[in-house]
């Protein structure tokens, strides 16, 4: 358990998620070339496997190309972990927003 | 399964993480007041429970106060889901960086 030092205890759900995101990034980043970034091929592999439900729903065939370009903020043709986290954040925001639209409005205080 | 429409299949690890992050945010955001943001009290509850290993390791008692201020980019005294994702991203980056320091250096191509 990376986040903890000393005594070992079960990770919390949040810690488990953080570890999983690192592990999944490393899994795909390690498929070819430099192991610490996602190449375009590795990004497509990630999107077609881990986010297949999202990817399959896209009618525009250029959407993944545009996503890669938008996420690659330093334009080096690779996604580093920070850029990858923006992808996850974007997906989480879209998912969260669709949830908010689906539930009845709540009193705001 | 929020990300998928139509046929139901097991979520991937990444989809599971996204769902978990939304669920844990909603769990803590729903503890008091407005259900769609973390108040300072809810943020402290989240940090002391979900990221307890990190929080307990901090020697400076003001660190959580400063984290809340830094994360609260619109300065409304609350953390919305986007601001919460920056907290998770920061923790993930720190965790990922400590991992990179711990493994032997690798040939860069």
Image (cartoon, coloured by chain):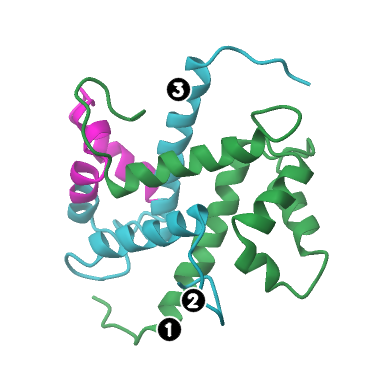
Chain colours: A green, B cyan
Would you identify the image quadrant in which residue A9 lies? Answer: top left
Q: Are marks 2 and 3 in contact (CB under 8 Å)?
A: no
Q: Are marks 2 and 1 in contact (CB under 8 Å)?
A: yes
- The residue that mark 1 highlights is A102
Residues in magenta? B45-72
Q: Which chain letter goes with mark 3?
A: B
Depicted A64 relative to depicted A96: above or below? above
Marking on residue A48: none
Image quadrant holding the C terminus of chain A, namely bottom left
Would you identify the image quadrant in which residue A81 lies? Answer: top right
**Crowd class of label 3 (few under 14; some 14 to 19; many from 20; radius 10 Å):** few
Marking on residue A98: 2
Seen at 50% across and 76% down, the residue is: B8
In terms of secondary structure, where does tag 1 sit? helix
Seen at 54% across and 73% down, the residue is: B4
- The residue that mark 3 highlights is B98
Q: Which chain letter goes with mark 2?
A: A
Residue A54: percent from the left, percent from the top? 63, 67
**Crowd class of label 1 (few under 14; some 14 to 19; many from 20; radius 10 Å):** few
């Amino acid at each position: 358990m990376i986040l903890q030092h000393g005594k070992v205890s079960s990770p919390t759900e949040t810690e488990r998620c953080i570890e999983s995101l690192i592990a999944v990034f490393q899994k795909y980043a390690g498929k070819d070339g430099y192991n610490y970034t996602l190449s375009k091929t590795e990004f497509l592999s990630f999107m077609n496997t881990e986010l297949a439900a999202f990817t399959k729903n896209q009618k525009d065939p250029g959407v993944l190309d545009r996503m890669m370009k938008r996420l690659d903020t330093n334009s080096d043709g690779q996604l580093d972990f920070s850029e990858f986290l923006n992808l996850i954040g974007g997906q989480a925001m879209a998912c969260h927003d669709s949830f908010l639209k689906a539930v009845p409005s709540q009193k705001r205080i």
